[in-house]
Image (cartoon, rainbow, N blue to C red):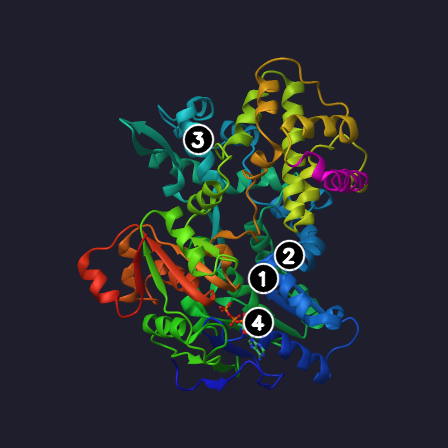
């Protein structure tokens, strides 16, 4: 920790007209402090008027909700959003027309930003018209690339992972990640990754902007495009910066450790004058390197006169959990604010589900316990094993597959899946995503406004009837949609499709929907960031992961930071499951944990 840092706690007031950086460990009360600080600025500032607001940026929609709730009646003078939504609303949407020539951006058709999609028709068009197509050689000729499955899969994956990089002149370039250009082949039950040829990718890379333009010209924009457009616009049109600085005299960014270099540049541009910038975060909880985050950007972030603060309390966890966290972390020794001893953290050795049952016992059976896993597969497996009736998590794909025989059947399953997804997103609180899903099936109806209205009406009907189909065969859900929502979908005659609809329940298919902002009790660690739970059950796949307690390296090892985030979510009880550990490790960890065989 830097000695020049000023120590504060989550109730401290700081000067409001000086740029700041607040660093603090887990459970220090960063979010609590930020909300207090905003209220203080609203109270004291001479620079806020009706049309001028505080911009408060945070990482997820869940975090936006949390801050809005805590701000209470003060919300109308604060704009709380994710960085992408903020940039989209205040830069891309109003000024995107300035990019019409350079990027072919079709502003009229712009309708929000989405996850990256790959339209294969566009891929074909792009490759067929590629200036360097004649350099594509067997077995990667134009024809072979767009017709052979063994090329289509890695090509699609590669295009799905295009990103932007700042070059040494601080210009943005579009780059492909060649490690993503693979398909999986099974060889004697072993899975082997087969990659697209490097030379072929090199040739294709020469015209990635042309590929992107095929989407932009239709108004299709993904999350990283929002950063790209914002950066381009701010760099070449300084009046936009002036407008933004006038609108937002204060800009605060929570969870700054997970911003990527382009975002940092944008924040730097805004903070160069007038706007006071404040960043809050924890380097030790930086877990998004796969999205370009670089933890060192937090401590190296500088603006003229910036004051650096540190909060050392841990207000969340019991003493025995904080002891464990302090073993892992060297830069801040957290103080035990609650000062409650609590149960000794526990390692359960053995099979995952048996360990989970034991963990429930340890938490007095009736208390809630949240499981946190490293990857999606494991968190889905936790859910799946608990809800035994789920046969597999590919049911949605099976349904789409079974209805592929004719275009009318294809449309039928598209409608069913869109309704299913829409309902599940809405039930998890993401109404915007739910409506978007349903808009996709009413493309033939009127203008944008009319489609939105119809989607909302359908969603309302579907949610209202939820109890009528939730635990029934999917056929009931289909009948409801045909009767009430989209009568034009084709009937279900005898055959494989009908059998499918009768064999699985709505609930079983609903479990296959991937919820983005996951509020459920079985989550990935990434989705648990910023949250806290009384009892936490962490799934470690092997004893190697326990090395974090013996040789911690939060600075250089992202896997350690991910485990640290998981361990620090617990308020009362911390339980780790690992299949087994050898004797040596057992004796070394004995001091820190109760170790139980299940
Ligand atoms: N001044 C305070 N008064 C009352 N409760 C507080 C105060 N500061 C923090 N808390 C409580 O302490 C807990 C941890 O705070 P918070 O979630 O804001 O921490 P954080 O620093 O954002 O943690 P993390 O980095 O782990 O997400 C929360 O339950 C919060 O409500």
Q: Is mark 4 within 8 Å of ligand 1?
A: yes
User: Element type at marker 3?
Assistant: helix
Cα separation, mark 1 vs mark 3, equals 37 Å
Image coordinates for residue 505, horizontal then vertical, percent = 60, 31
**Which residue is label 1 attached to?**
235
Cα separation, mark 3 vs mark 2, equals 31 Å
Q: Is residue 100 visible?
A: no
Cα separation, mark 2 vs mark 1, equals 19 Å
**Which residue is label 4 attached to?**
31
Cα separation, mark 2 vs mark 4, equals 20 Å
Q: Is mark 3 within 8 Å of ligand 1?
A: no
Vertical relation: 232 (above or below) 502: below
User: Element type at marker 1?
Assistant: helix
- Is 459 in the magenta? yes
- Is 295 in the magenta? no
Q: State ligand 1's quadrant.
A: bottom right
First in residue order: circle 2 vs circle 1? 2
Residue closer to the observer: 101 or 481: 481
In the image, which residues are magenta? 450-470
**Which residue is label 2 attached to?**
85
First in residue order: circle 1 vs circle 4? 4
* Between marks 3 and 4 in the image, the one whose residue lies nearer the viewer: 4
Viewed as shown, does residue 29 lie left or right of 78?
left
Viewed as shown, does residue 234 lie left or right of 140?
right
**Which residue is label 3 attached to?**
153
User: Element type at marker 2?
Assistant: helix
């Amino acid at each position: 920790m830097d000695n020049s840092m000023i120590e504060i706690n989550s109730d401290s007031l700081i000067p409001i007209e000086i740029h700041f950086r607040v660093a603090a460990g887990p459970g220090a009360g960063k979010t609590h402090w930020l909300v207090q600080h905003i209220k203080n600025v609203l109270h004291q500032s001479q620079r806020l008027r009706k049309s001028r607001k505080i911009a408060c940026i945070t990482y997820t929609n869940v975090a936006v909700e949390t801050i809005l709730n805590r701000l209470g009646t003060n919300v109308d003078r604060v704009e709380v959003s994710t960085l992408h939504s903020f940039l989209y609303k205040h830069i891309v949407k109003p000024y995107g027309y300035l990019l019409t020539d350079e990027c072919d951006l079709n502003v009229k058709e712009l309708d929000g930003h989405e996850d990256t999609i790959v339209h294969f028709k566009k891929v074909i068009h792009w490759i067929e018209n590629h200036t360097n197509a004649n350099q594509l050689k067997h077995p990667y000729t134009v024809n072979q690339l767009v017709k052979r499955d063994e090329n289509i899969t890695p090509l699609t994956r590669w295009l799905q992972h295009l990103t932007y990089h700042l070059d040494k002149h601080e210009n943005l370039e579009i780059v492909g990640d060649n490690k993503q250009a693979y398909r999986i082949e099974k060889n004697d039950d072993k899975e082997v990754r087969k990659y697209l040829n490097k030379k072929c990718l090199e040739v294709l890379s020469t015209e990635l902007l042309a590929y992107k333009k095929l989407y932009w010209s239709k108004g299709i924009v993904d999350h990283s495009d929002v950063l790209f457009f914002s950066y381009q616009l701010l760099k070449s049109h300084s009046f936009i910066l002036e407008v933004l600085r006038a609108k937002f005299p204060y800009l605060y960014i929570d969870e700054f450790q997970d911003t990527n270099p382009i975002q940092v540049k944008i924040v730097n541009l805004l903070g160069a004058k007038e706007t006071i910038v404040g960043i809050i975060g924890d380097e030790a909880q930086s877990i998004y390197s796969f999205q370009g985050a670089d933890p060192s950007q937090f401590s190296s972030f500088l603006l003229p006169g910036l004051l650096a603060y540190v909060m050392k309390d841990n207000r969340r966890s019991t003493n025995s959990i904080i002891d464990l966290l302090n073993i892992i972390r060297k830069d801040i020794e957290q103080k035990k604010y609650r000062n409650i001893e609590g149960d000794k953290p526990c390692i359960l050795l053995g099979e995952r589900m048996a360990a989970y049952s034991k963990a429930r016992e340890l938490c007095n059976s009736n208390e809630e316990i949240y499981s946190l896993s490293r990857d999606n597969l494991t968190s889905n497996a936790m859910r799946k094993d608990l809800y035994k009736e789920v046969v597999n998590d590919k049911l949605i794909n099976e349904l789409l597959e079974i209805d592929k025989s004719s275009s009318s059947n294809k449309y039928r399953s598209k409608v069913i899946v869109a309704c299913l997804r829409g309902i599940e997103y809405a039930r998890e609180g993401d109404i915007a995503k739910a409506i978007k899903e349903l808009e996709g099936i009413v493309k033939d109806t009127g203008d944008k406004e009319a489609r939105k209205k119809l989607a909302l009406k359908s969603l309302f009907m579907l949610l209202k009837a939820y109890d009528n189909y939730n635990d029934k065969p999917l056929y009931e859900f289909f009948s409801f949609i045909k009767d009430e929502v989209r009568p034009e979908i084709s009937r279900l005659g005898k055959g494989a499709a009908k059998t499918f609809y009768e064999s699985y329940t709505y609930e079983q298919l609903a479990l296959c929907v991937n919820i983005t902002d996951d509020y459920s009790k079985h989550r990935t660690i990434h989705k648990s960031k910023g949250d806290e739970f009384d009892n936490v059950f962490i799934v470690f796949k092997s004893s190697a992961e326990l090395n974090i307690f013996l040789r911690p390296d939060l600075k250089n090892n992202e896997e350690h930071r991910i485990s640290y985030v998981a361990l620090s979510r617990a308020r009362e009880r911390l339980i780790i499951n690992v299949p087994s550990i050898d004797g040596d490790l057992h004796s070394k960890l004995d001091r820190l944990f109760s170790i139980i065989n299940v």
